[in-house]
Image (cartoon, rainbow, N blue to C red):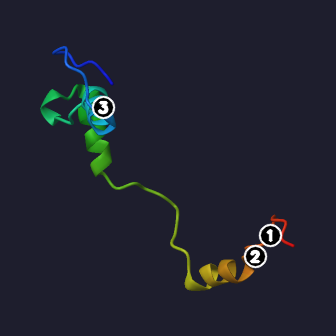
Amino acid sequence: MLQKPDGSKTANMIETLKFMIEQLIPEDNAQDDTEHHMNFRRLLTEPIETTDREFTQDEVRQIIEGFNPRAGRNYK
């Protein structure tokens, strides 16, 4: 059990976990953002530039066909 600021204690595991989450994870409020947070939010909305490409069906098929679920295990 944890003691709350009002002096009462949590009654069970669920209440304790809820209390911990409320205390440790702040509400996400854009109005409270610093300059750093505003820049970070802006970056999250921009598309990520990458040179990655999607796998082809043939590449996926080759990987699946080459998969050996018993590799590295000691089956008898």
Residue type, label 3 = Thr
Badge 3 or badge 2: first in the primary sequence: 3
Q: Front-most of 66 and 25?
A: 25
Residue type, label 2 = Asn
Crowding at mark 3 (Cα within 10 Å: few <14, some 14-19, many 20+): some
Label 1 element class: loop
Residue 13 drawn above or below residue 58: above
Numbered badge on residue 71: 1
Farthest residue to the right: give it: 76
Picture quarter containing residue 49? bottom left
* Tag 2 and tag 1, C-beta contact below 8 Å: yes
Residue labelled with disc 2: 68
Q: Quadrant of the N terminus?
A: top left
Q: Quadrant of the C terminus?
A: bottom right
Residue at 51% x, 72% y is: 54
Position of 18 with respect to 72 (left or right) is left
Residue labelled with disc 3: 16
Mark 1 vs mark 3, CA separation in Å: 44 Å
